[in-house]
């Protein structure tokens, strides 16, 4: 087996981010290798851990108080699929967000690459606490997607 080598369109779209991280997990044996399916599973509010869904709900309630608009319902929709990666794009007044969800079928790995460009004081203020928990949240969302997409079908 070859060693996996990754590049993400999240980095192509945003070559000099203020924040970037990559979370990698194992592709379950029976799971699809479709990156769009993985992106949908990772960001599905219905299947993410409840504590994350509650945090997103709280975010929607609190951000207008600091002058940041609520995220639209389809904020995590897949903008495009290129090869083995689905890209999610969300730009707003306070930050630009890219998330590439890639599947390496041969190496049996799934990766979630996030890049963020902050805009102004509000963006920095908003993202300061998010930065601390982001990798923990993404790992939990990826584990939930692994369980969901790796479950036996029948």
Image (cartoon, rainbow, N blue to C red):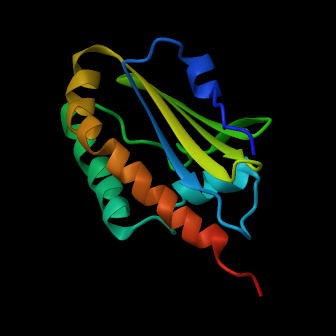
Instruction: Tell me the residue at 80%/36% (across/down).
Output: 83
Specify the quadrant that holds the C terminus: bottom right
Query: Where residue 16 sits in the image (x, y, percent)?
Result: 46, 11
Instruction: Tell me the residue at 53%/17% (across/down).
Output: 14
Q: Nearer the viewer, residue 139 or 51?
A: 139
Residue 147 lies left or right of residue 49; in this view the side is right
Q: Quadrant of residue 69?
A: top left
Query: Where residue 78 sits in the image (x, y, percent)?
Result: 66, 42
* Residue at the extreme front: 1
Q: Nearer the viewer, residue 54 or 114?
A: 114
Q: Quadrant of residue 37?
A: bottom right
Query: Where residue 48 sits in the image (x, y, percent)?
Result: 46, 64
Residue 2 in sight here: yes
Instruction: Tell me the residue at 58%/27% (across/down).
Output: 10
* Residue at the extreme bottom: 154
Q: Nearer the viewer, residue 104 or 136?
A: 104
- Residue 32 in the image: above or below residue 85: below
Instruction: Tell me the residue at 34%/43% (across/down).
Output: 134
- Residue 69 in the image: above or below residue 105: above
Counting every numbered tag in the picture gives 0
- Residue 141 in the image: above or below residue 68: below
């Amino acid at each position: 087996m070859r060693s996996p080598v990754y590049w993400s369109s999240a980095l192509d779209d945003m070559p000099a981010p203020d924040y970037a991280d990559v979370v990698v997990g194992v592709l379950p044996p029976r799971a699809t290798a479709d990156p769009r399916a993985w992106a949908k599973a990772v960001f599905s509010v219905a299947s993410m851990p409840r504590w994350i869904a509650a945090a997103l709900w709280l975010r929607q309630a609190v951000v207008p108080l600091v002058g940041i608009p609520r995220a639209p319902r389809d904020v995590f929709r897949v903008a495009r699929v290129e090869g083995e990666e689905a890209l999610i794009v969300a730009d707003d007044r306070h930050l630009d967000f890219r998330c590439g969800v890639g599947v390496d079928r041969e190496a049996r790995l799934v990766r979630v690459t996030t890049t963020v460009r902050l805009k102004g004081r509000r963006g920095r203020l908003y993202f300061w606490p998010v930065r601390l928990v982001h990798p923990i949240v993404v790992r939990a969302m990826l584990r939930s997607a692994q369980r969901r997409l790796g479950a036996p079908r029948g």
